[in-house]
Amino acid sequence: NFGRSPPTPADGAAAGDGDAEERLLALQIEQAKRDVENMEVQLQKVLRREKAARGVIVKKALYGDLRLHKESLADGLAGRRTIEAEDLVGPTLEVTSPLQCLVEQHTIVL
């Protein structure tokens, strides 16, 4: 499908039917879960290699709206404490494992 054209429903439902979109979203969520499970093998391989070489180990990585809440701004920018997910406007997604899997020869390759 290109642009915003709805998928052609197999069960005869009307085009643009919300049920078709919900089914598509459910399929995408299931595929993402399988991808994460499959990534675990690669993650363990990368972690073993990097730990043995005292290389790059990603402790925490977040993706999303990383702006700080006003009450956390001063401390965060001054480096007085570690910024936590609760300090961020969000929403955020935890991406530590996927980012660690991008490490090659002690470098994060994007």
Image (tube, grey):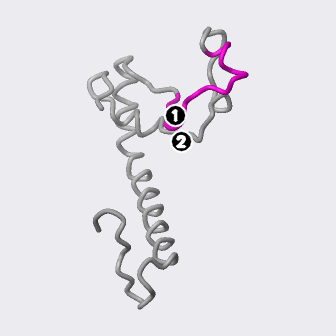
Compared with 4, 88 (above or below) is above
Residues marked 2 and 1 touching at CB (< 8 Å): yes
What residue lies at 40% left-to-right and 34% top-to-bottom? Answer: 99
Residue 9: in magenta span: no
- Report the residue marked by disc 1: 62
Element class at badge 1: strand
Q: Nearer the viewer, residue 35 or 4?
A: 4
Compared with 77, 37 (above or below) is below
- Mark 2 and mark 1 lie on one chain; the one further toward the N terminus is 1
| Residue 66 placement: quadrant | top right
What residue lies at 34% left-to-right and 19% top-to-bottom? Answer: 53
Identify which amino acid the numbered label 1 is placed on. Leu
Q: CA distance from mark 2 to mark 1?
A: 6 Å
- Residue 48 lies, in percent from the top left, at 38, 30
Identify which amino acid the numbered label 2 is placed on. Leu
Q: Nearer the viewer, residue 55 or 103?
A: 103
- Report the residue marked by disc 2: 93
- Residue 85 lies, in percent from the top left, at 63, 32
| Residue 4 placement: quadrant | bottom left
- Residue 51 lies, in percent from the top left, at 40, 23
Which residues are the magenta region?
A: 60-76
What residue lies at 60% left-to-right and 38% top-to-bottom? Answer: 90
